[in-house]
Image (spheres, rainbow, N blue to C red):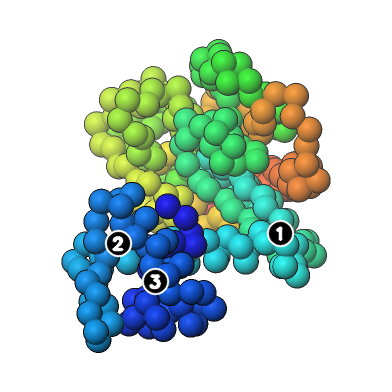
Amino acid sequence: MTFQQLTYVVEISKCGSINKAAQKLFLSQSGISTAVRELEEELGIQFFVRSNRGVEFTQEGKEFLSYAVSLLEQKQRIESLYGEARNFSAPVRFSVSTQRYPFTEDAFLRMLRRTTDNRYVFSIREAGMDAVIDDVYDHRADIGVIFLTELTEKIIRRLLDARDLDFHEIAAVSPCIYVRKGHPLANRDEVTEEDLAGLPYVSFEHNQGVGSDYSEEYQLLSMKKPPRRISVNNRATMMNVLAATDAYTTGSGLLVEGITSQAVVTMPLAGKTCIRIGWIRPRNSKLTPYVAQFVGLLDQSIAESIAFTESVHQSLCHSGEESS
């Protein structure tokens, strides 16, 4: 089967006769008839019935026609995108897969504002750690953003090594809890695991079978079986739940001015080891200009997020001292 044969069948359907189709295509009637007959024999079907009035397509012919039209349209689309006659260059492509961090979104937005390309396809995907690693490994993403903790580092690094991926650390920050601004714990210098006992706990949903090592939250022993638990699947819903209830969650604690909800604040967890934030890429792969630019912007965004978060926390602590 060839595209030429598909074209003949489609043109016959449009013209209603083999003779008219031949005239339109500047071909002989016998040439088209032979090509169509060979295709019918190859597929074991009859496209149409001939008569003095032209042709009438059979049910099988009508079904085949729908596929033929679709294939020819796709062929034309591919030719227009990649054919020699195109008068424009291919769009620039860049994709990032990330755990649900506002600073990654901030870096991505900065990159969008700085680009001067006329044609580009940029994408950002927020997902669980296992999905981020899969995206980079399967080349669906140019770069991934994840975090490691003392508890998870061994197993995550083992997985990264098995897939020839490298982790590049950008910052190490103290793990924090996220709560609403008026929460009873909101004005403390730091909170302990015991302070959280009995409070509703919010976490991002996990695919069945995915271990807690891939969690997006900082894992605490008390969180293994919390008495009250709320599961969400996106960052916006997480922020809304925290802002409207006395629930809490855990993580890096980093806030981004203009992106993170102003109704949610963070406090450090006492006595916990640092969260290590970084990016992953295939081992020994050369950074493209766009990946290198994004890494620089991510570094900048995280640094500014750390400074902004500290200023918010100091302001809260200061207001708490004044009110007491």
Q: What residue sits right under mark 1 in the picture? A: 90
- Disc with the residue nearer the chain's start (2 vs 3): 3
Q: What residue sits right under mark 3 in the picture? A: 10
Relative side of 180 to 321, left or right: left
- Give the spatial CA distance, label 2 vs label 3: 10 Å
- Give the spatial CA distance, label 1 vs label 2: 33 Å
Horizontal and vertical percent position of residue 57: 24, 72
Q: Is residue 156 above or below residue 105?
A: above
Horizontal and vertical percent position of residue 89: 75, 62
Name which quarter of the figure residue 71 lies in. bottom left
Nearer-the-camera pick, 129 or 116 = 116
Relative side of 27 to 29, left or right: right
Q: Residue at x 40, y 81 (%)?
A: 19
Horizontal and vertical percent position of residue 137: 57, 30
Helix, strand or loop at disc 3?
helix
Helix, strand or loop at disc 2?
helix
